[in-house]
């Protein structure tokens, strides 16, 4: 099928331009993404056409891992340090492009304004958040299926069976 206006519905490299459901037949299922990557790597080592292969995460979950407790002191300190770095960089750039040579005043001004601005932003953000902990979010899957286009699915299944048997050829 062609795209409207005579263009292709696939981008360079054969990937679809728009999000589309994966296609193909399942040739393997793995508990972790690393195991699925290892399986595709094994197929590549065996000179299998891996451009026909897709790794699909199934049963997606958003996992939020709590990494620490937040307090006013920690929030304001982190805001001040972030602001100091940003202010120093801006001040350095302004100081370098000064017509009278390098000047220290823009660096000091940038440092002070950066600390003040980021501390205020951090305080407002923390005051409005109502959360006393920091966390990191991650999207993970319950399992990872390896799919393959029908034209080579059987060969892919046979190769992954070899991997399951310790990499020894079957038959």
Image (cartoon, grey):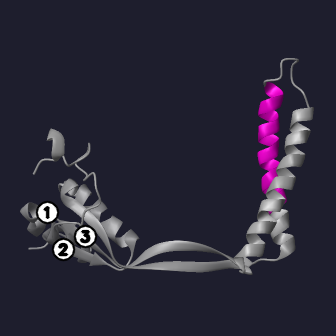
User: Horizontal and vertical percent for residue 62?
Assistant: 48, 78
Task: Classify residue 112 as left or right of residue 14.
Answer: right
Task: Classify residue 168 as left or right of residue 132.
Answer: left
- Can residue 7 be seen here? no
Q: Secondary structure at mark 3?
A: strand
Q: Please, is residue 6 above or below residue 73 in the view? A: above
- Can residue 152 be seen here? yes
Q: Secondary structure at mark 1?
A: loop
The structure residue drawn at horizontal position 34% and vertical position 66%, both measured from the top left corner, is: 38
Q: Please, is residue 123 above or below residue 115 in the view? A: below
User: Horizontal and vertical percent for residue 28?
Assistant: 23, 75
Give the quadrant of residue 74.
bottom right
Give the distance between the C-alpha atoms of the residues marked 3 and 1, in whole angstroms.
10 Å
In the rendered structure, does residue 80 fall within the stretch colored magenta? yes
Give the distance between the C-alpha atoms of the residues marked 2 and 1, in whole angstroms.
9 Å
User: Horizontal and vertical percent for residue 161?
Assistant: 19, 74
Q: Which residue is mark 1?
A: 149
Task: Classify residue 125 as left or right of residue 24.
Answer: right
User: Horizontal and vertical percent for residue 141?
Assistant: 39, 77
The structure residue drawn at horizontal position 27% and vertical position 51%, both measured from the top left corner, is: 17
Proximity of marks 2 and 1: CB atoms separated by less than 8 Å: no
Please report the bounds of the magenta region as a residue range.
79-96
**Of residues 44 and 153, the one drawn nearer to the viewer in this rendering:** 153
Proximity of marks 2 and 3: CB atoms separated by less than 8 Å: yes
Which quadrant, please, contains the C terminus?
Answer: bottom left
Q: Earlier in the sequence, mark 2 or mark 3?
A: 2
**Of residues 100 and 145, the one drawn nearer to the viewer in this rendering:** 100
Q: Which residue is mark 2?
A: 26
**Of residues 49 and 17, the one drawn nearer to the viewer in this rendering:** 17
């Amino acid at each position: 099928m062609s795209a409207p206006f005579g263009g292709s519905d696939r981008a360079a490299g054969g990937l679809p331009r728009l999000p589309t459901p994966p296609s193909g037949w399942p040739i393997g299922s793995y508990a972790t993404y690393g195991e699925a990557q290892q399986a595709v790597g094994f197929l590549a080592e065996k000179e299998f056409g891996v451009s026909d292969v897709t790794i699909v995460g199934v049963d997606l979950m958003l996992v939020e891992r709590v990494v620490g407790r937040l307090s006013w002191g920690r929030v304001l300190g982190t805001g001040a340090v972030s602001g100091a770095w940003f202010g120093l960089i801006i001040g350095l750039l302004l100081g370098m492009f000064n017509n009278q040579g390098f000047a220290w005043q823009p660096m000091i001004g940038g440092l002070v304004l950066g600390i003040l601005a980021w501390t205020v932003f951090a305080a407002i953000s923390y005051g409005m958040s109502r959360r006393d902990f920091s966390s990191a979010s991650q999207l993970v899957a319950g399992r990872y299926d390896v799919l393959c286009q029908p034209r080579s699915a059987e060969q892919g299944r046979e190769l992954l069976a070899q991997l399951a048997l310790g990499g020894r050829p079957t038959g």
